[in-house]
Image (spheres, rainbow, N blue to C red):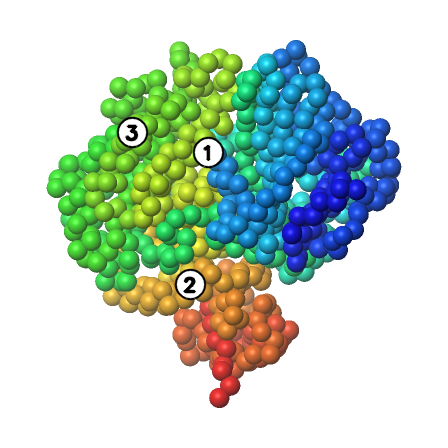
């Protein structure tokens, strides 16, 4: 049994082959945290872990004991997991163990995204019930361990069994206490166009973290934090990840206290998300996913990649190869008619595309971004025969058809806003801030969710639409839900998210064959909560191949390649003005979910031929790219950032692809070597290069080489590269390794 209860020491030990997570009930009933890390022996008591440093005052003060569910007001003075205000105004909360229950499998969380199991044997769950004697507030702390993954999931349900209402002021998803501060904190920060850039620094006394209060997880931060030892690398050393399955306001922070112990916490942002739990009611908080690895940051990423693509993504697309798509946006923006689209689709089909996506501009009277959001009927000026006809023409070409929507938004210039101004978020009588000429619809109002299910449902049932890009292009200001009473306005942000998840669930259940891609002006809501409904995300509006290396590199800390929409676009790049070679753009986009976002009619014959070859190349390798183990080899955030490299290795270690990128050309680069990872040291691999070239670089590398030497010595990058076709800026090469079967 992977969860061991030792009645004598009142200890719960969750374990698998790789990790252990240990909790202990103290004499006073408090649930203490003993350990999270590499597997410990079972059948033993670990209560003595609490005795080091000044933690011996067990039953007196909780500070700085490591705790599973720290509250405020009962002797712990660090950042809490749960704080309340009782009906009488008091804030003291002292939760004591009442009982626990161990069950096979993993429970589903009502209304919220969660990881899951296909079979009860994949995981075991313990629910610990803790009760506050004075108030009859009960908490069920839910912890799951997967049998074959270094993963623990954590959430809680707060239940009010007393006669009066309780206000929850802080209700985080997970707290993790660690006994020393020799850690660095790594988070993903950014901005529009440069999402998920890692920030990494040693811990110091005090609190540090990232939060979103924008209504969505945001471009500026991601609901994730990692702690790693100072000596941890991509491939070695201890690292811990905390990732939150939530798409709204969150907080992910770490505190180092006066005793130099560490507390990490992650959950809904306590400043902007509060909740009233009426008598007999409860609140389920989102799920957090904790990963431990001694294989460095790469080990943490691998655990997230596998869990999220195998047991977070749901539905028909989980296990199917994702289609190569052509998206109309950067090709024609709002300026198209039916024939334009069919011509583009025809050209895309000739290049090997499988899916043609009509982005923004097909509905209402939308010639720019100033009108029509909310009016989800086809624009007959542009598409006079209607959507079903267009879909049929695209399908007749042998392509699937996809469409763009932005359901949560409304333009003031729209019929919907004229009819239902009260459905837009904002306080009646106060001006609403317009961002991108639009307002946000109040998803905390069930009427709005019902309406959107009806209109979006009728579009999706009007024609065989195979793909939906669900966009979200602004943040929330003037947060106020007109359908909520005054004393529930603090719940607005979370109720908004519950409404979004509800709409997503209804539509994904009704249209299980549709592939959803989430988007929020690029990566403004790229988080695991969205992944539960939309198996892929448009991770940035920036399609420039140089910027994309950084964005994809950072995103890969948590998110699998199959979930990263990555498009080849035209040059000069529309966001940066940079001109990069077509093959470099593809060599970056290959390590994601490949698409093209340009007007395929505008490609000259040579470029069209390259694209044809790129798509054919990728189709033969996409299952390896999406299913293999990803390794980050050279960081574009380190040194002068001039080079980046990564690789994917098949689980059988018989194939691998290495992507190497150099931004600026270097006159005499010297002998560069790129050490690989994850290969079979005893195997021999044939190395070939893409794009194919008869040059010095190809000649130096196109040999049969041992897995051992490739990992210890490496690929040759710069030897005689001055003779290579790789001269010039913005170069990329892909090295393909295929195991040679001895004859
Ligand atoms: C923002 C998205 O990120 C773009 O890809 C595009 O879909 C536009 N919105 C359309 O308005």
Spot the residue most to the left.
385
Instruction: Count neighbours of disc 3 (C-alpha within 10 A) and say few if under 14, some if 14 to 19, many if 20 or more.
Output: many
Marks 1, 2: nearer the viewer:
1
Decide which of 422, 124 is in the foreground and name it.
Answer: 124
Residue holding disc 1: 111
| Residue 88 image offset from top left, x and y in percent | 66, 11
Mark 3 residue element = loop
Label 1 vs 2, first from the N-terminus: 1
Residue 329 badge: none
Q: Residue at x 58, y 67 (%)?
A: 678
- Residue 616 higher or lower than 31, as above or below: below
Q: Residue at x 40, y 27 (%)?
A: 443
Marks 1, 3: nearer the viewer:
1
Q: Indicate yes or no: mark 3 CB to ligand 1 under 8 Å.
A: no
- Residue 115 higher or lower than 158, as above or below: below
Residue holding disc 2: 623
Mark 2 to mark 3: distance in Å? Answer: 38 Å
């Amino acid at each position: 049994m992977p969860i061991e209860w030792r009645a004598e020491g009142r200890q719960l030990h969750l374990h698998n082959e790789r990790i252990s997570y240990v909790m202990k009930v103290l004499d006073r009933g408090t649930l203490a945290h003993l350990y999270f890390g590499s597997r410990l022996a079972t059948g033993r008591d670990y209560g003595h872990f609490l005795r080091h440093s000044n933690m011996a005052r067990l039953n007196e003060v909780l500070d700085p004991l490591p705790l599973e569910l720290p509250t405020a007001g009962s002797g712990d003075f660090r950042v809490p997991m749960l704080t309340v205000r009782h009906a009488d105004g008091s804030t003291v909360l002292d939760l004591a163990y009442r009982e626990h229950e161990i069950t096979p499998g993993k429970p589903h969380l009502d209304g919220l995204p969660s990881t899951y199991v296909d079979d009860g044997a994949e995981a075991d769950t313990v629910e610990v019930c803790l009760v506050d004697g004075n108030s009859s507030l009960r908490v069920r702390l839910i912890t799951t361990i997967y049998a074959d993954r270094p993963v623990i999931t954590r959430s809680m349900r707060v239940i009010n069994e007393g006669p009066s209402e309780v206000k929850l002021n802080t209700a985080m998803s997970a707290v993790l206490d660690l006994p020393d501060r020799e850690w660095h904190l790594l988070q993903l920060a950014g901005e529009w166009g440069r999402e998920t850039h890692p920030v990494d620094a040693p811990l110091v006394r005090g609190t540090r973290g990232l939060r979103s209060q924008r209504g969505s997880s945001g471009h500026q931060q991601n609901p994730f934090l990692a702690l790693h030892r100072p000596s941890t690398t991509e491939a070695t050393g201890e690292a811990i990840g905390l990732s939150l399955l939530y798409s709204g306001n969150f907080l992910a922070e770490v505190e180092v206290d006066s005793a130099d112990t560490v507390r990490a916490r992650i959950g809904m942002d306590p400043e902007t998300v509060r909740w009233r739990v009426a008598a007999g009611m409860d609140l389920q908080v989102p799920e957090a996913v904790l990963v431990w690895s001694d294989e460095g940051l790469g080990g943490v990423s691998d655990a997230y990649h596998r869990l999220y693509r195998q047991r977070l993504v749901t539905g028909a697309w989980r296990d199917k190869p994702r289609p190569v798509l052509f998206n109309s946006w950067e090709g024609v923006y709002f300026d198209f008619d039916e024939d334009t689209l069919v011509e583009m689709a025809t050209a895309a089909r000739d290049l090997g595309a499988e899916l043609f996506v009509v982005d923004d501009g097909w509905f209402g009277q939308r010639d720019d971004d100033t009108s029509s959001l909310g009016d989800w009927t086809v624009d007959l000026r542009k598409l006079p025969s209607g959507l079903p006809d267009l879909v049929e023409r695209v399908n007749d070409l042998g392509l699937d058809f996809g469409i763009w929507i932005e359901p949560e938004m409304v333009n003031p210039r729209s019929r919907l806003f004229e009819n239902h101004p009260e459905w837009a978020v904002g306080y009646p009588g106060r001006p609403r801030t317009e961002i991108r000429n639009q307002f946000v619809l109040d998803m905390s109002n069930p009427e709005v969710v019902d309406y959107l299910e009806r209109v979006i449902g009728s579009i999706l049932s009007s024609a065989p639409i195979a793909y939906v890009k669900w966009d979200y292009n602004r943040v929330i200001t003037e947060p106020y839900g007109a359908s909520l009473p005054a004393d529930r306005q603090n719940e607005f942000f979370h109720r908004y998210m519950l409404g979004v998840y509800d709409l997503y669930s209804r539509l994904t259940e009704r249209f299980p064959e549709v592939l959803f891609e989430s988007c929020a002006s690029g990566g403004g809501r790229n988080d695991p909560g969205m992944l539960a409904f939309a198996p892929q995300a448009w991770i940035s509006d920036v399609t420039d191949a140089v910027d994309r290396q950084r964005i994809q590199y950072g995103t890969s800390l948590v998110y699998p390649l199959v979930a990263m929409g990555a498009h080849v676009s035209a040059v000069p790049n529309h966001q940066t003005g940079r001109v990069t070679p077509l093959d470099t753009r593809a060599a970056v986009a290959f390590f994601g979910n490949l698409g093209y976002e340009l007007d395929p009619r505008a490609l000259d014959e040579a470029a069209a031929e390259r694209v044809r070859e790129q798509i054919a190349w990728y189709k033969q390798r996409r299952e390896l790219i999406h299913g293999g183990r990803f390794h980050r080899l050279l960081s574009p955030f380190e040194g002068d950032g001039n080079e980046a490299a990564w690789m994917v290795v098949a689980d059988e270690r018989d194939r691998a692809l290495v992507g190497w990128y150099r931004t600026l050309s270097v006159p005499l680069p010297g002998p560069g070597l790129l050490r690989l990872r994850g290969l079979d040291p005893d195997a021999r691999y044939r190395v070939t290069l893409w794009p194919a070239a008869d040059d010095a670089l190809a000649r130096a590398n196109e040999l049969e080489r041992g897995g051992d030497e490739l990992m210890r010595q490496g690929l040759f990058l710069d030897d005689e590269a001055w003779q290579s076709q790789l001269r010039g800026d913005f170069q990329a090469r892909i090295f393909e390794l295929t195991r040679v079967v001895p004859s």
